[in-house]
Structures are given as structure tokens and as C-alpha cells.
Amino acid sequence: MVCDPSPVMEQVQAKKKPSLRARQKELRKKQMLEAARKLFIANGYSKTSIETIAQNAEVGVATVYTYFENKENLAANLIRSDINEIFWEVSRVSESLPDDPAEAVIKLIDVLVNFHKFITAELLREFVSEARINGPVGEVWDWTHRNQIAAIARVLARGKELGRVAEPLDVETAAALIIDLMDRHLNKLTTSGNTKSIDGQLEQFIRLLFVEWTPG
């Protein structure tokens, strides 16, 4: 799937300097998100209430609901914020990728897997494991997945242009396969302490795919 150059473009602000009111609203929103982040780390999502988030952010409960429809909507905003950091880095790295498509994909994957370091990665897994993926968090999950695939698909499409990826290859399907391998890798990271071994295995799998995808 090849879509817009980067999902973070959604976040680009108008050049006009925001008003004092707009800056205050953004600051208040950040206060609530950071309060929620700390509480999710300390107590977990399920045991964190909107009331506690409001108290720690030093705002009223009504203010939280003014900015976020419910706790899940707040969690979705927090997850999207972290994922945007990853996509900003993907955008930066994409400007200097090697011509070798396998090396380019591995370089992007090295950036994408860093999401597991964020607390919201664990939060997202909680929703997935408990089949609560419909709703705001599910929308962020789908958005993330689409844009991960898009980033890899662009590399494969460029590989085709350079004659280094077989022409018949469906780049979107191939990109989805690579992201599926990455997701499996991230699941292993949560249960194994030997991350170096897992990282090496993921790289091997990707290189094996390109044996089949290289022309001639």
C-alpha cells in the first residue's frame, strides 16, 4: 500500500503562529497525556481511572472529558503520539536509504521495531490480547499498520525502478509479509531476553525473502 509520503504530515501545523488560547489548550492536553502515561506505567490501563488522571494533571474531570471522549480515546491519543515519533524517524531515515532494497528494508525495520520501547506498545498489546481492538485504539492500530506497510512498499517500489526487485512482485503484499514478520519479532521480544539473537533472525528472514524477490 503506497499512500501519502508520511503519516506525520497530518500533524503539520499552519505557519501562522498559534494564539495564546490555542497554546494553553495544547499545554493542558499534554499535561493530561503525560499524567495518563505515568499512571499507566505505575498501575496499568485497567486500574487507572479518569478521576485519577484528572487529579494528577491538576485539572477537573470535566476538562478531561472536554478533550477526550473517554479513557480509551485518551489512550489512543497517547499511542498515536508515540507512533508519530517513530514515523518522523522513518521519514528522516528514508531520505538516505541505500539502493540495495534488502539493506533499505532492514534499515527501516530497525527504526520501526523501536516502538516496543514505548510504554504505549505494552498498552496496545493489552488491547489486542483482550480482543478490545475495536474503537479508538483499534483505529490507531489500523492506521499504524497501514503506514508501516506503506513505508516498506515504497522501498520495494523504488527497488523495482532500479531493477533490483522482480517486476511481478506485488509490493503491497510483500510489504505486508515483512511487517507480519516484524510483528512476530516484537511478540518474541516480550517473552525472550535474548534480543540480539531475535534481531539477527529477523534480518535473516528478510534477506531470505529478497533471494526470491531479486530479478534473475
Image: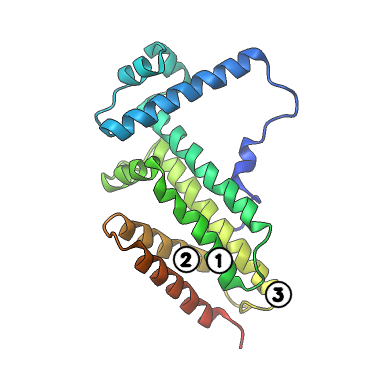
Q: Is residue 45 left or right of residue 60?
A: left
- Sequence-wise, which precedes: disc 3 or disc 2? 3
Residue 172 seen in render? no
- Sequence-wise, which precedes: disc 1 or disc 2? 1
Q: CA distance from mark 1 to mark 3?
A: 15 Å
Q: Is residue 213 left or right of residue 46?
A: right
Q: State the residue in front, 9 or 194.
A: 194
Q: Residues within 10 Å of mark 3 (few under 14, many from 20)?
A: few
Q: Amino acid at mark 2?
A: Ile
* Residue visible at 55% across and 79% down in the picture: 213
Q: CA distance from mark 1 to mark 2?
A: 9 Å
* Residue visible at 57% across and 75% down in the picture: 169
* Above or below for 150 versus 26: below
Residue identified by numbered label 3? 162
Q: State the residue in front, 48 or 176.
A: 48
Tag on residue 178? 2
> Residue 56: horizontal and vertical position, in percent?
36, 18
* Above or below for 21 versus 108: above
Residue identified by numbered label 1? 105
